[in-house]
């Protein structure tokens, strides 16, 4: 064998070995993420059929990740390989209608030092804006259905797109922290996640009852003895900030919501998102079997909690949230800048000029 042939053969062997090592590393990472799940799956498969002592039995909680399919979007795969951390990433959608708000959003992400975030640019102007500010971005390949809405649509229309776009991220095997851009980041959110559910979401609730659940009694006097009926209620999850794992129930959720939004033209994406997550199976309807977790409302804070409660409470105002979402107020940009002044620059008067609610 000639020396050149031997070198070529050796080079090919090295390349093949590197590929095998890369694939093995990927499998080990997935195995590490799902080792607890594997033990539970063995139980589910009947390897251990007997239940344990009273109080020790725990049902299956965490669904396994799907196998990554890079063929779904090779270009996005290359981007995510560079910027994702532990196969997790913050994703936001934006078009040129919201450039000023987007700038406040990514400026605070940079300040906190969060490396794994990505803007899905819905038009060329946002792509150029992100590029000039050294912000990681992804511009989708042209698609008449999605791109037309993305370029000219308002906030509500763009919000509905995310369920279709997020599907590819999950198919590639990445967990996504979906973020609206009217959010101020004060800490790294990945340090405060549980990762034990398909969907982990912030709440629109404003106290322990509304955020985490309460027994609401319905009174119907005409019924006499049975006039009081107990109901279980929570306030809805916020579809503008949630962590979603790459599991089959998660992908099914995105499909269900996207399909309904495409057919029900007046539907609100947040209402549909919650209906598909929480409605139980009943005659004529097969409910989604997805695990869900409500985020801590003081760490992942909505603007009602901030302006109505926290800023007026001496103890709560000392807490440092992870994020604050301006979802309850229309004057978003002014309030976002005030939040930065209050929590980052230490201006204790920054929040005082604002009313608890909005003027309309």
Image (cartoon, rainbow, N blue to C red):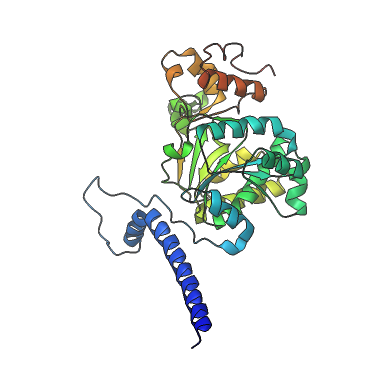
| Residue drawn at point x = 43 percent, y = 38 percent | 191
Residue farthest toward the bottom in the current orientation of the protein: 1
Question: Residue 135's x, y, as percent?
Answer: 62, 41
| Residue drawn at point x = 56 percent, y = 19 percent | 341
Q: Give 17 or 311, whichever is nearer the viewer.
A: 17
Question: Residue 242's x, y, as percent?
Answer: 53, 40
* Residue 125 visible here: yes
Q: Quadrant of the C terminus?
A: top right
Would residue 36 appear left or right of 342 to someone viewing this image? left
Q: Give 32 or 281, whichever is nearer the viewer.
A: 32
Would residue 227 appear left or right of 156 to someone viewing this image? left
| Residue drawn at point x = 49 percent, y = 51 percent | 87
Would residue 165 appear left or right of 245 to someone viewing this image? right
Question: Residue 170's x, y, as percent?
Answer: 55, 53
Count of labels shown?
A: 0
Q: Quadrant of residue 37?
A: bottom left
Residue farthest toward the left in the current orientation of the protein: 53
* Residue 227 visible here: no
Would residue 82 appear left or right of 295 to someone viewing this image? right
As displayed, is residue 101 above or below residue 308?
A: below
| Residue drawn at point x = 33 percent, y = 62 percent | 42
As displayed, is residue 218 above or below residue 166?
A: above
As displayed, is residue 33 above or below residue 116?
A: below
Q: Quadrant of residue 77?
A: bottom right
Q: Give 151 or 84, whichever is nearer the viewer.
A: 84
As displayed, is residue 111 above or below residue 306?
A: below
């Amino acid at each position: 064998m000639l020396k050149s042939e031997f070198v070529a053969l050796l080079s090919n062997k090295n390349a093949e070995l590197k590929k095998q090592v890369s694939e093995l590393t990927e499998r080990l990472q997935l195995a590490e993420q799902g080792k607890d799940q594997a033990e539970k799956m063995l139980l589910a498969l009947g390897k251990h059929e007997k239940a344990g002592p009273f109080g020790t039995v725990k049902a299956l909680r965490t669904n396994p990740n799907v196998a990554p399919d890079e063929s779904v979007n090779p270009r996005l795969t290359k981007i995510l390989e560079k910027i994702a951390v532990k196969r997790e990433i913050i994703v936001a959608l934006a078009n040129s209608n919201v450039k000023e708000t987007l700038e406040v959003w990514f400026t605070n992400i940079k300040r906190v030092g969060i490396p794994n975030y990505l803007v899905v640019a819905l038009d060329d102007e946002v792509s150029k804006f992100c590029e000039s500010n050294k912000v990681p971005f992804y511009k989708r390949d042209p698609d008449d259905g999605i791109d037309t809405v993305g370029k000219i649509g308002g906030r509500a229309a763009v919000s509905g797109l995310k369920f279709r776009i997020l599907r590819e991220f999950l198919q590639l095997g990445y967990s996504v922290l979906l973020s609206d851009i009217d959010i101020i980041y004060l800490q790294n959110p990945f340090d405060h996640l549980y990762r034990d559910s398909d969907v982990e979401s912030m709440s629109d609730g404003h106290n322990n009852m509304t955020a985490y659940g309460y027994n609401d009694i319905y009174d119907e006097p005409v019924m006499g003895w049975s006039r009081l009926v107990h109901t279980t209620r929570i306030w809805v999850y916020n579809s503008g900030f949630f962590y979603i794992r790459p599991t089959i129930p998660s992908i099914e959720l995105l499909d269900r919501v996207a399909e309904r939004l495409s057919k029900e033209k007046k539907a609100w994406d947040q209402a549909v998102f919650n209906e598909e997550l929480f409605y139980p199976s009943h005659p004529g309807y097969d409910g989604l079997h997805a695990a869900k977790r409500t985020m801590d409302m003081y760490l992942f804070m909505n603007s009602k909690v901030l302006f109505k409660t926290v800023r007026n409470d001496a103890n709560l105002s000392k807490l440092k949230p992870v994020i604050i979402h301006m979802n309850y107020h229309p004057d978003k940009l002014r309030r976002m800048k005030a939040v930065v002044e209050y929590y980052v620059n230490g201006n204790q008067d920054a929040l005082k000029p604002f009313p608890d609610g909005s003027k309309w």
